Image (spheres, rainbow, N blue to C red):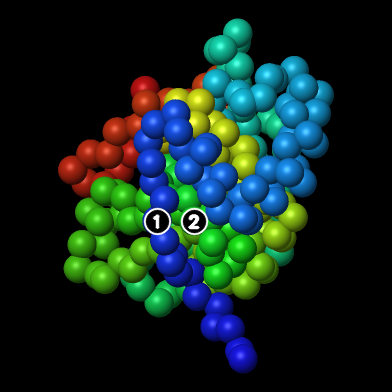
Amino acid sequence: MIRVAVCLIILNVNIIDTGFLEQQKKYPRVRQAIDQSLKNIDTLFKSKGVGFPAQKIFLRVFKSEQKIELWAKSSKVDTFCQIKSYKFCSTSGVLGPKTKQGDFQIPEGFYHLNRFNPHSIFHLSLGINYPNNADRILNKNNNLGGDIFIHGDCVTIGCIPITNALIKELYVIAVYSKNSGQSKIPVHIYPAKMSQINLEKINRSFNDKHKIFWANLKDGFDYFEKKHKLPKIIINQSGQYSFK
């Protein structure tokens, strides 16, 4: 039987209380992931000087580099520390935002995890709240689609796939963070590392098609790069982000 590479969710498990971990443990894949990865996760966080579970975690995604960065902070400090980088194992689309259903694009913008799927057809899946209000305002006449996930299995038509071994680790980290009280885990998705040189390069490659949009994303990238703190993000009536 041929499995079609689509980003689907079969069951949404989205419980917001301190029993979230116990709810997730009801699923065999989650129990297996915890058994296989928890000790290594604890060692990884300690090696970075951050206790596990951390007070907060944060994900940055770079499409050109095909990487997910995991950042975390403890209650003892105000700034985030990079814990690890996860490599995509497949990708689709090109640089630039997702603007409609079926365009194979990975979204770009400022999101958060909103779903945990413990028996995804792609092993384990972490849902991203695309489309957000900015997407809706900027592309109001389009059917924007949805069901964008970070998942396993190395197949995609617009999601962010990593290997099954890596999604086990990242899924467990996210479950423990949510169970410890982090109701929203931010996910910032960029076309590339937003240095001025990279921004000029990708703008030339796309004939400045996304120049204004990418400049707006760079403001958010620069805020975190300089401070290693998460800004408060506001979406205005024009669909632009501001950072405070």
Q: Is 46 or 209 nearer to us in this picture?
A: 46
Residue 155 location, x and y as percent? 62, 72
Residue at the outermost front position: 26
Q: Is 209 or 21 nearer to us in this picture?
A: 21
Disc 1 on helix, strand or loop?
Answer: loop
Residue 171 location, x and y as percent? 60, 46
Q: Are marks 1 and 2 in contact (CB under 8 Å)?
A: yes
Q: Amino acid at mark 1?
A: Asn
Q: Is 225 or 81 nearer to us in this picture?
A: 81
Q: Is 199 or 146 nearer to us in this picture?
A: 146
Q: Earlier in the sequence, mark 1 or mark 2?
A: 1
Residue 147 location, x and y as percent? 41, 63
Disc 2 on helix, strand or loop?
Answer: strand
Residue 184 location, x and y as percent? 42, 35
Q: Is residue 142 visible?
A: yes
Q: CA distance from mark 1 to mark 2?
A: 6 Å
Residue named by callout 1:
12
The residue shown at (31%, 66%) is 144
The residue shown at (60%, 8%) is 76
Residue named by callout 2:
117
Q: Is residue 226 visible?
A: no
Count neighbours of disc 2 (C-alpha within 10 A) and say few if under 14, some if 14 to 19, many if 20 or more: many
The residue shown at (50%, 75%) is 6
Q: Amino acid at mark 2?
A: Asn
The residue shown at (48%, 50%) is 116
